[in-house]
Image (cartoon, helix red, strand yellow):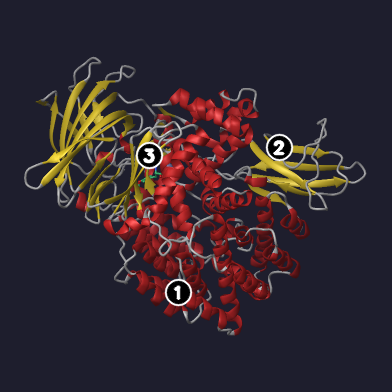
Amino acid sequence: MRAGQSAVTRRLDYAPPAFWIDSVELTFDLDPAKTRVLNRMRLRRNPDVPAQPLRLDGDELNLSRVMLAGQGCSFRMDGETLVLENLPEGNAPFELEIFTTCYPEKNSKLMGLFMSGGDFFTQCEAEGFRRITYFLDRPDVMATYTVTLRADKARYPVLLSNGNLTDEGELPDGRHFATWHDPHNKPSYLFALVAGKLVAREQRIATRSGSEHLLQVYVRPGDLDKTEHAMNSLIHSVLWDEARFGLPLDLERFMIVATSDFNAGAMENKGLNIFNTKYVLAKPSTATDGDYDAVESVIGHEYFHNWTGNRVTCRDWFQLSLKEGLTVFRDQEFSMDLAGTPSARAVKRIENVIDLRSAQFPEDAGPMAHPVRPDEYLEISNFYTTTIYEKGAEVVRMYQTLIGREGFRKGIDLYFQRHDGQAVTCDDFAQAMADANEGSDLARLLPQFKRWYSQAGTPVVKAQGRYDAAARTYTLTVSQSCPATPGQPRKEPFVIPVQMGLVGADGRDVPLQLDHWQQAVQGSHTVVLTEGETTLTFIHVDAEPVPSLLRGFSAPVELDIDLAPAQLMHLLAHDSDPFNRWEAGQQLALQTAIEKIESGADTALAQPLNDAHLQALRAVLRHPQLDAAFKALVLTLPDEDYIADQLDTVDPQRIHAVCEAMARQLATELRADWAWAYEQCHDTGAYTPDPVSSGKRSLAGLALHMLCLAAQQDGDAVWPGKAYQRVKDAGNMTDRLNALHALVYSGHELAGRALERFYTLFKDEPLALDKWFALQSHAPDRGGHILPAVRQLMKHPDFSLRNPNRARSVLSAFCHGNPAGFHRRDAAGYVFWADQVLALDAFNPQVAARLARAMDAWARLAEPYRAAARAAIERVAAHAGLSNDVREVVTRALT
Ligand code: 0A1
Ligand code: ZN
């Protein structure tokens, strides 16, 4: 190990702490150049652990003084760790005072105490608190915090920390102070402070139980008009958690503060959530429907952490999905409940599955694949992954599928009854769910069910159906397997709930009766797979049905079922399960895409979609009953990442060429239908972000995109003209951005002027400007023009690598979101990637490591991409002084 490098942390090495910290008093003298921190804490030995020295974590701190019970004392440094050996024996509490300084304005990692727009913010999860003071910076050490902030009053009029304000007042020299006390025990990663020139939207609410609370959303002074949706989302969150899970708000005051410099989306610090502005600020002229939805779900997510994460936290970071998987599940349910109608719920479910498949499935198939409860890490920041979050949420959803909503609620109740105030493990959660549901499939199968936590990889469920007309039986043979992942060559069978139905020739569900049942059931049934192979025989089946498996995406698996196009079209037209109706359309498109990709012939690009397929899509588009949002999802072709994930060898240019050909054909052949859809949906009146009007905007946006694409084939000027007009005069950001998108993506000559127009309108709105950068970095590559455009964007006066949102709007949009622009035959995309990863790593390793992951799938690339990708990764890996964050990503990629 080289100096400065740290070692791997292993789950099985967990040992309880040698000391407990009961209370912490922190005093900050805030100054951007040099902040002084006094940490006075009460500790005691953990009687369950043999006596050993106290080892306090630190990171880039300057230590001034250590005092034990008011006296100077001896200590030593072991790297960044502060070690105290001569502490009192016995279990009596003792007091330790530590004086340190740190440099917020130099803190470019945005972990610990940092500056954003001249204001102070903190980020402590996972290991940022050790950048503020020496501490037992691990989630199982919980303390009460009293925090005093002192700062210049004119410059930092607002001083916030967790809990309740207990004192405030003036100090000499124009300074002032505020003292906050948080009565709840919490781990250090939930500590937060904010100081700056901020204003708040406030609302007092009374909950069902009658308790009163103050809700506040703090932003920079010019942004107050963009906080209404955030406040409404917060109010909905409070009410929903009480109604659905019986979990009330446990604080008098709940604060949200927005910052424009933030590595992640948001952070659930107790009573003082800190948010990336992207997930707080929204008004119709600057935020899209997607932004409104994201604000609602992230506000919900952080609020729901107050119970799932804060009241009950993680024993160690390997248990991260205990809080994240559960909280994502809760925010998904929240958004579905707010959406209301079955169709709007299905749309939310489909959107979640699209994200899972295009990000988590590839992760599970690549070098960073890890179980929902990982076994080891080099840098914990690298494990805030879509596997921990989204696959973790699917695992939680499977509990609900297996034990039902009521059973799930009983499990949650027992979980809090047992563990409120504790730091626990995924096993504790699973046990509470099973114990609250004695006699259930879950309780019986718990040890096997828990393989979802320990085995990585996306299981494959293979199904084959056979109809026996004479016996009137339909037999499904279903087998499961799971590909090898790093360190896990072989897998044991999972417990897989497969919700299913059989669709008859008339389009209705056939009553289901397994051969050992007395009676048939109507509609869907959930089969629980536990074996490598299972045979299911349905009786009294009068005619050959079409199987509809994995309804609602009841398990995070890949379904391998050989359905003929006619069968898929039957499901697309009739399936009673909207998820599978959509899925049938995706599978149809996927079959075509894969066939054309594999054929390799240029002729395959001419008319890839056949008439029946086009007719089926037209029928959905023109359907009198289906909602616009659902139609838009069905008519959106699978994305290039999802298609790539289905292939053993990936040629990104070929995939892109086929996708473009499919889109062009869909545009031209359904042109009249698109025009009809646009006319039906384009005017949604005064902006509201509700599912019906946002669905209409979504379909109108897709239609306009298609119409501009069709226009590019024959030089028609009408639709591009309409799109340009809409960029100029749209009444909301969704319509305006969709119109800009239509022009840029179709490569129309008006795109340049439209982009200029947009820039002029939004040059002072950072979040809108991020969209402007991202749209251009993300646009379809035609003849290799995107990389030079990206380089040009990086020279734009509004570009900055230091601001994570802005850096991502160009670099992630290009390296992660634009496969055809990025994977160039001349390797220039990879050279660019390596340069940017190294540039970012020098000051913000977390953002760098995220970008580094754009090369995860390199080993499946076709030549010449593969060799060039490897060379670029090797160049990064060989760089001296690489952070642990990036080093872990590139070393895993190369093994
Ligand atoms: N717990 C937060 C996510 C989060 C994780 C790490 C961070 O540090 C950079 C910030 C936020 C959540 O799930 O929302
Ligand atoms: Zn979270």
Mark 1 packing: few (<14 Cα in 10 Å), some, or many (20+)?
A: few
Foreground label between 2 and 3: 2
Spot occupied by residue 856 in the image (x, y as percentages of width and height): 48, 54
Which one is in front, 145 or 839?
145
Which one is in front, 641 or 324?
324
Decide if ligand 1 comes within 8 Å of the CB at mark 1.
no
The label on residue 8 is 3
- 696 on left or right of 32: right
In primary-sequence order, the first of circles 1 and 3 is: 3
The label on residue 527 is 2
Spot occupied by residue 376 in the image (x, y as percentages of width and height): 43, 38
Q: In this view, does 742 lie above or below 381?
A: below
Ligand 2 rendered quadrant: top left
- Mark 1: secondary structure: helix
Query: Label 1 amino acid?
Result: Asp
Q: Label 1, on which residue? A: 729
Corner quadrant of residue 457: top right
Query: Label 3 amino acid?
Result: Val
Foreground label between 2 and 1: 1
Corner quadrant of residue 383: top left
Asked if the residue at tag 1 contacts the one at tag 2, i.e. Cβ–Cβ closer than 8 Å, the answer is no
**Label 2 to label 3: alpha-carbon separation:** 40 Å
